[in-house]
Structures are given as structure tokens and as C-alpha cells.
Image (spheres, rainbow, N blue to C red):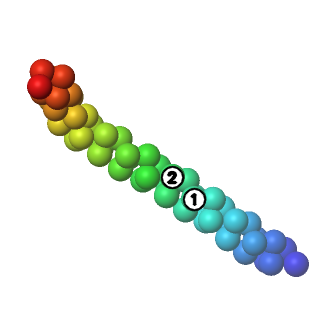
Amino acid sequence: MRTGLLIIMMIFFAGLALDIGVLAAALLAFVLVERALYPLLRRRIPERASV
């Protein structure tokens, strides 16, 4: 009984850690893409305004 509970807890916490890892990776990817694209968009906005 105690071993089964331990296995269930291990699976739960492993899944929780995986979910947190996926969210952290997605947030990091979003930040990196946003930082890469923002200067490009910032340069193009004045060009469009001047035309």
C-alpha cells in the first residue's frame, strides 16, 4: 500500500515538473522571439509613417 502511494506521488510530481518545464520553455521562447522581432518592427514603423 505504501509503495503504491509512493509511485503515485512520484508520477504526480514528475508530471507537475514536466508541465512547469514546458511552460517555462514556452515563455522563454516567446521572450526570445519577441526580443528578436521587436527591433525589426520598430525600424519598419517609421518607414511606413514617412511614406
Q: Residue at x 49, y 58 (%)?
A: 22
Q: Amino acid at mark 1?
A: Asp
In this picture, is 7 found above or below 18?
below
In this picture, is 43 found above or below 20?
above
Q: Amino acid at mark 2?
A: Leu
Whether pointer 1 and pointer 2 mark residues with C-beta atoms closer than 8 Å, the reply is yes
45 relative position to 34: left or right: left
> Residue 13: x percent and y percent?
66, 61
Of 42 and 24, the residue lying toward us: 42
> Residue 12: x percent and y percent?
70, 65
Of 30 and 44, the residue lying toward us: 44
Quarter of the image where the C terminus is located: top left
| Res. 29 visible in picture | yes
Of 27 and 18, the residue lying toward us: 27
> Residue 23: x percent and y percent?
51, 52
Disc assigned to residue 8:
none
Of 26 and 19, the residue lying toward us: 26
Among the 4 quarters of the image, the one containing residue 6: bottom right
> Residue 30: x percent and y percent?
37, 46
Quarter of the image where the N terminus is located: bottom right
Secondary structure beneath label 2: helix
Secondary structure beneath label 1: helix
Q: Residue at x 42, y 53 (%)?
A: 25
Disc assigned to residue 23:
2
In this picture, is 45 found above or below 10?
above
CA separation in Å, label 1 and label 2? 6 Å
Residue designated by label 1 = 19
**Residue that protrudes farthest toward the right in the picture:** 1
| Res. 39 visible in picture | no
20 relative position to 50: left or right: right
